[in-house]
Image: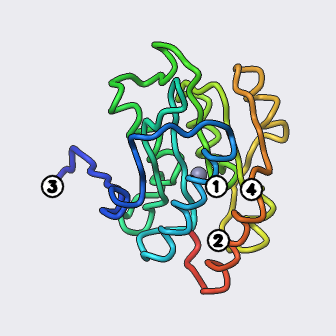
């Protein structure tokens, strides 16, 4: 048998946990949502301790994502890639800012090597980050993978502004709780 499709889903709780109708002005509110998603994903047992959200013009929410690697048996189902894929399906374009921006990705933790690559191609203008990679690796068993040494510069050269350490302590707390609970490494 040859599989010819893949079906990825977010947990059902996202519909009650996220207010999709409101605006999320400012960097802080965007990352706050990403971290809240990461926390809820751990509490609900629906994936790893990572959350992300994509915002379009007017600070409007386009999509959210949480880590679904284990539930979906899919190594690419990270919070950032889920959010990108869902936003791209919603807008029906592989380049999110093609029809105008700014488009912003907020993530609870620094993108890994895979999500760095996905960020290069997704068509975003700004990347907002909570916890650092070093936080992820210190507090959990997750591996960030081989990122370019100058990953910020690589994004800047492609017109993507990076803002890091937003609500970092809050993001670290979710990672710490997950790590202390003996979460699997994905
Ligand atoms: Zn990732």
Q: Position of residue 25 (x, y in %)?
A: 61, 36
Question: Which callout, 2 or 4, points at the residue further toward the start of the chain?
Answer: 4
Residue 167's label in the rendered image is: 4
- Give the distance between the C-alpha atoms of the residues marked 2 and 4, in whole angstroms: 12 Å
Tag 1 secondary structure: strand
| Quadrant (top left, top right, bottom left, bottom right) of the N terminus | bottom left
- Give the distance between the C-alpha atoms of the residues marked 2 and 1, in whole angstroms: 9 Å
Residue 1's label in the rendered image is: 3
Question: Which callout, 4 or 1, points at the residue further toward the start of the chain?
Answer: 1
In front: mark 4 or mark 3? 4
Q: Give the residue number, with chain letter if any, for mark 2.
A: 174
Q: Give the residue number, with chain letter if any, for mark 1.
A: 108
- Give the distance between the C-alpha atoms of the residues marked 2 and 3, in whole angstroms: 40 Å
In front: mark 3 or mark 1? 1
Question: Which callout, 4 or 3, points at the residue further toward the start of the chain?
Answer: 3
Question: Which callout, 3 or 1, points at the residue further toward the start of the chain?
Answer: 3
- Give the distance between the C-alpha atoms of the residues marked 4 and 3, in whole angstroms: 47 Å
Tag 4 secondary structure: loop
Q: Is mark 4 within 8 Å of ligand 1?
A: no
Q: Compared with residue 42, is residue 59 higher up or lower down, i.e. above or below?
A: above
In front: mark 2 or mark 3? 2
**Front position in the image: 8 or 161:** 161
Say whether marks 2 and 1 touch (CB < 8 Å): yes
């Amino acid at each position: 048998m040859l599989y010819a499709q893949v079906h990825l889903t977010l947990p059902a709780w996202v519909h009650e946990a996220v207010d999709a109708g409101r605006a999320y002005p400012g960097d802080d509110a965007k990352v706050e949502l990403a971290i809240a998603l990461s926390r809820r994903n751990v509490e609900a047992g629906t994936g790893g301790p990572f959350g992300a959200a994509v915002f379009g013009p007017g600070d409007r929410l386009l999509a959210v994502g949480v880590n679904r690697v284990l539930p979906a048996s899919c190594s690419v189902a990270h919070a950032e890639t889920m959010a990108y894929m869902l936003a791209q399906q919603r807008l029906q374009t592989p380049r999110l800012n093609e029809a105008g921006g700014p488009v912003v990705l907020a993530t609870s933790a620094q993108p890994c090597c895979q999500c760095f690559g996905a960020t290069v191609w997704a068509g975003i203008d700004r990347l907002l980050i909570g916890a650092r990679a070093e936080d992820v690796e210190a507090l959990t068993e997750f591996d960030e993978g081989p990122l370019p040494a100058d990953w910020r510069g690589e994004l800047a050269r492609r017109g993507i502004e990076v803002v890091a350490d937003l609500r970092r302590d809050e993001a670290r707390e979710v990672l710490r709780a997950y790590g202390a609970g003996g979460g699997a490494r994905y």
